[in-house]
Amino acid sequence: MPLIKIEKVEKIYGEEEIKTPALRGDSFIVEKGEFVAIMGPSGSGKSTLLHILGFLDRPTKGEYFFQGKSMNQYSDDELARIRNEKMGFIFQTFNLLPRTNVLDNVKLPLYYSRIKELLWEDKAKKALEMVGLSHRLKHERSQLSGGEKQRVAIARALVNDPDVIFADEPTGNLDSKSGQAVMDIIQNLNEKGHTIIMVTHEKYTSEMAKRIIKLKDGLIESDEKVINRHYAKDGLFK
């Protein structure tokens, strides 16, 4: 059973005469442990697709199966619970809370989980150790570099040990060196068994995935395995 399966998914914005199709009947599956990059020009539907896959939006038509169960069978409250417990999110803009230290930012998803509070700190510290930030626990957002902020965001995405991590342009606000460090972490997470689905417009970043889905005008233009994959370096995040 695939982790993710979408069948003829459409997304249409607007009503009556003013309708804008964002997705036009796309179908594919994602197996557990894959690393998939979704590419396409602005307006191609890649962010819309990521929002549907991450239970942040519902399709207009078609079906989306997550772990074998249709999205249509869940209430909004159930979708929110699954999104918190089984999915992790990394955003281009980091989305860290201001005036809140690194450790408490990483703990945030745990407040909405069914995990006992006495375990929160240990889980957050373990996630930060995985991204090499154990020495920044008490720092606030304003005291971090862009690359460090994104690493905190990755730790927050990991803290609930999700089944899949969604990354939306994770290197978009970073310089090339920081972006490479973030991609090394994401690639190592995949090597350890985490499923990654990443939206990116950068060719080099996409080639660090194992598979690239290209969208154009809301349709899948190609879906191919990456042959010459760039492997993360051995070191801190291995």
Image (tube, helix red, strand yellow):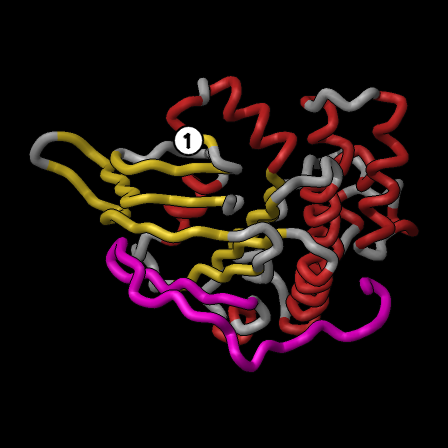
Return the residue nearer the eye: 199 or 171: 199
Q: Residue at x 41, y 22 (%)?
A: 73
Q: Quadrant of residue 105?
A: top right
Residue 55 covered by magenta stretch: no
Residue 221 covered by magenta stretch: yes
List x then y, in percent, for residue 167: 56, 52
Secondary structure state at the residue bearing disc 1: strand
Left or right, residue 58 beside residue 109: left
> Magenta segment range?
210-238
Return the residue nearer the eye: 80 or 180: 80
Report which residue position mark 1 lands on: 70
List x then y, in percent, for residue 86: 62, 35
List x then y, in percent, for residue 156: 72, 41
Q: Is residue 155 above or below residue 182?
A: above
Q: Amino acid at mark 1?
A: Ser
Q: Residue furthest bottom?
A: 228
Return the residue nearer the eye: 170 or 79: 79
Q: Is residue 159 above or below residue 217?
A: above
List x then y, in percent, for residue 227: 52, 79
Q: Residue at x 48, y 57 (%)?
A: 199
Q: Residue at x 69, y 35 (%)?
A: 97
Q: Residue at x 25, y 35 (%)?
A: 61
Left or right, residue 47 beside residue 196: left
Regarding residue 230, the answer to whether it shows in the image is: yes
Left or right, residue 197 beside residue 127: left
Return the residue nearer the eye: 49 or 73: 73
Q: Residues within 10 Å of mark 1 (few under 14, many from 20)?
A: some
Quarter the C terminus occupies? bottom right
